[in-house]
């Protein structure tokens, strides 16, 4: 994993202008470069590249990403080939353990394709939002050793962290008009494509969420998606948020996904092979009502359903209380 991270970092260190200059007619625009967008018909330059930040953005069609995304889209390359072209070395995503999980996550999310297994198709606006969301996730770094991991450890999570969680050291917050550290979670639809991300803004040391409104921001169409925090089995748990799902998994030793909201648990499309779903509700009528709605939905599809709720608060409160007692 460390080697893969170094290869990706080396690829992302290549200036966007160096790649684009061989393929587009660039004009200097202050600290940036601009050109007519190669991804839609553009009569005046709306495509901007920022070498310092390492991102490109089109203000016409919404295309957004880093240098890997740019080369992949301009030359029609897959992710690994684009990285190899830039870094001179192919990322060594091995076919076992967490790396196999990450490899399949990357492969499934290179670009959106129609599938018989998906119950919906995005319109043009949703496709642009999905493209932006995937760029955010791919531009983020593995969560290990970052303030993102520190935050989850501070919340009492002791499990190995899945590759669906990443970290961005400088994530833009449109409300505050500033960049802050953020935990970035990938939401995957029913066929595994990343369609959205959830960003949790953090303090620099990871010891809590940032005092900014809102502290969490989604990007992209969530539809039937979930944050897949573990490989599914015959039994699969669903919880409201990332911290709650990881806590429930830690307590019950079951695979648990985050629905990214109590009101979304019923909308998650479960993978084939799941026979029993456990809904980890927050205490209180709102959380239990959402769990009961989801229970009716899944029971109507022939699944065995259980609801588990703590005496008060949520499952992360239980984990943190146990951690305080043990301290």
Image: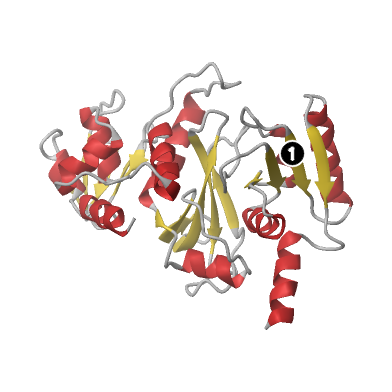
Task: Name the residue nearer the viewer: 38 or 206.
Answer: 206
Q: Which residue lies most toward the left here?
A: 22
Which corner quadrant holds the C terminus? bottom right
Q: Which residue is mark 1?
A: 277
For this view, does 296 lie left or right of residue 179?
A: right
Q: Is residue 151 above or below residue 256?
A: below
For this view, does 57 lie left or right of residue 297?
A: left
Residue 63 position, x and y percent, is 36, 36
| Mark 1: few/some/many CA within 10 Å (<14, 14-19, 20+) | many
Q: Is residue 57 above or below residue 251?
A: above
Residue ID at (72%, 40%):
265
For this view, does 14 lie left or right of residue 289?
A: left
Residue 38 position, x and y percent, is 25, 29
For this view, does 176 lie left or right of residue 22?
A: right
| SS for callout 1 | strand
Q: Is residue 58 visible?
A: no
The total of numbered circles placed on residues is 1
Task: Name the residue nearer the viewer: 151 or 105.
Answer: 105
Residue ID at (84%, 32%):
296
Residue 153 position, x and y percent, is 56, 69
Task: Name the residue nearer the viewer: 43 or 298.
Answer: 298
Residue ID at (15%, 34%):
24
Residue 279 occupies quadrant = top right
């Amino acid at each position: 994993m460390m080697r893969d991270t170094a290869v990706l970092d080396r690829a992302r260190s290549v200036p966007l202008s160096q790649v684009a200059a061989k393929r587009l007619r660039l004009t200097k625009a202050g600290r940036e470069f601009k050109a007519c967008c190669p991804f839609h018909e553009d009569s005046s330059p709306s495509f901007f590249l920022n070498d310092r930040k390492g991102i490109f953005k089109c203000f016409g069609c919404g295309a957004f990403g880093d240098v890997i995304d740019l080369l992949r889209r301009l030359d029609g390359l897959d992710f690994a080939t684009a990285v190899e072209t830039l870094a001179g070395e192919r990322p060594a995503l091995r076919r076992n353990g967490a790396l196999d999980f990450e490899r399949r996550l990357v492969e499934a999310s290179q670009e959106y394709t129609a599938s018989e297994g998906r119950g919906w198709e995005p319109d043009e606006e949703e496709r642009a939002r999905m493209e932006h969301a995937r760029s955010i996730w791919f531009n983020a770094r593995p969560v290990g050793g970052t303030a993102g991991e520190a935050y989850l450890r501070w919340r009492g999570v002791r499990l190995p962290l899945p590759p669906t969680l990443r970290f961005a050291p400088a994530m833009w917050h449109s409300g505050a008009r500033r960049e802050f550290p953020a935990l970035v979670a990938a939401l995957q639809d029913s066929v595994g494509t990343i369609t959205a991300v959830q960003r949790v803004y953090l303090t620099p040391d990871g010891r809590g969420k940032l005092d900014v409104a809102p502290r969490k921001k989604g990007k992209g169409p969530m539809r039937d998606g979930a944050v897949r925090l573990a490989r599914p089995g015959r039994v699969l748990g669903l919880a409201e948020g990332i911290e709650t799902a990881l806590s429930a998994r830690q307590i019950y030793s079951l695979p648990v996904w985050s629905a990214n909201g109590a009101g979304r648990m019923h909308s998650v499309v479960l993978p084939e092979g799941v026979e029993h779903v456990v809904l980890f509700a927050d205490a209180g009528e709102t959380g239990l009502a959402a769990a009961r709605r989801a229970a009716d939905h899944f029971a109507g599809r022939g699944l065995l359903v259980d609801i588990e709720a703590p005496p008060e608060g949520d499952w992360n409160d239980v984990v943190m209380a146990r951690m305080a007692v043990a301290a």
